[in-house]
Amino acid sequence: MILISGATGGIGGEVCRLLQDAGTPFRAMARRPEQVDALRQKGMDAVLGDFDRAETLATAMRGCDTLFLITPPTQSQFRQETGAIDAARREGVKRIVKISASDGNIHSPVPWARTHARIDHHLRGAGIDWTILKPTAFMQNFLWFKDPVAKGLLPQVAGKGSVSWVDTRDVARVAATVLTEDGHAGATYFLTGPETLDMKEAAARLGEVTGRRVRYLNLPKPLFAALLRLTGNSRWMTRGLVVQFADVVAGHHDIDPTFEIERLTGHPPRDFRTFVRDHRAAFTGQG
């Protein structure tokens, strides 16, 4: 049995959908009873599990031999994920597939990049088979700026830095593949989109697909931070994002496409135009 954490999130939810469509047995984990009920209404085996309550993890993992591990970037992420890894070992889980980050580095100025590097190290020494997926920045992050994009502006602070943006649906497709196949133990896969784009090129693609002119506006860091706060980000997240995009300016995210997604799943990753087309209503203020 496969336990899917993050079952109500973008990647975890898509992994659940893919496994359900394939008829693969799995158990979806969620933090709140109403989320568990909603998953069950979709025909899923769902269970309550909270990374901040160790006793719920033991119950959720019971009878599972594989864990899909994903948590959002927070100040508690290291404690949550290492606690889940330790609980998995105690409950007899044999394999963990973890979502990490392509920029994971113990010396990174980006807080979650440092955290992922530490968690990855803990996982490799846990005595459990592991597979680590390291995606680049998500195309879905552009949806944070859907309202200004709908008005013709892409506000950012990334200078001329390029990123091999990847669609979270493709990350989920790799995860579903790895979770259901043998032969991936001890593997680390870097997952990218099919091209690298800077913000000016991304703005051009947004305009091309939406049929509206979109202009990249490279903001001063304090103004970008204020925008992030206005869109609901915490102070900790805002500081981290400003640092991360400064990392983009420095070229630390300019990773050549790896083509691992197509090699692992048999299907090429979505390009940025496809992503925008699939979310056109959001970027034009209609959804």
Image (cartoon, rainbow, N blue to C red):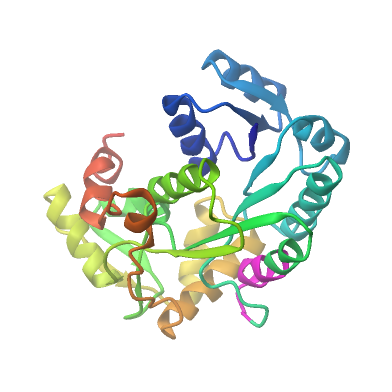
Q: Is residue 113 highlighted in magenta?
A: yes
Locate residue 70, reporting x and y percent.
62, 49
Q: Nearer the viewer, residue 240 or 182?
A: 182
Q: Residue at x 65, y 56 (%)?
A: 130
User: In the rendered view, does 176 fall on the left or right side of 263?
Assistant: right
Residue sticking out furthest to the bottom = 250
In the figure, 120 relative to 145: above or below?
A: below
In the figure, 42 relative to 149: above or below?
A: above
User: In the rendered view, does 93 fall on the left or right side of 137?
Assistant: right
Locate residue 93, reporting x and y percent.
75, 43
Looking at the rendering, the stretch of residues picked out in magenta corresponds to: 108-119
Residue sticking out furthest to the front = 183
Q: Is residue 150 highlighted in magenta?
A: no
Locate residue 62, reporting x and y percent.
79, 31
Q: Main secondary structure of the magenta part?
A: helix
Counting the numbered discs, the total is 0
Which quadrant, please, contains the C terminus? top left
In the figure, 285 relative to 113: above or below?
A: above
Which quadrant, please, contains the N terminus? top right
In the figure, 145 relative to 122: above or below?
A: above
Locate residue 237, reporting x and y percent.
61, 61
Residue 34 location, quadrant? top right
Q: Residue at x 67, y 78 (%)?
A: 106
Q: Nearer the viewer, residue 16 or 207?
A: 16
User: In the rendered view, does 199 fall on the left or right side of 156?
Assistant: left
Q: Residue at x 16, y 48 (%)?
A: 210
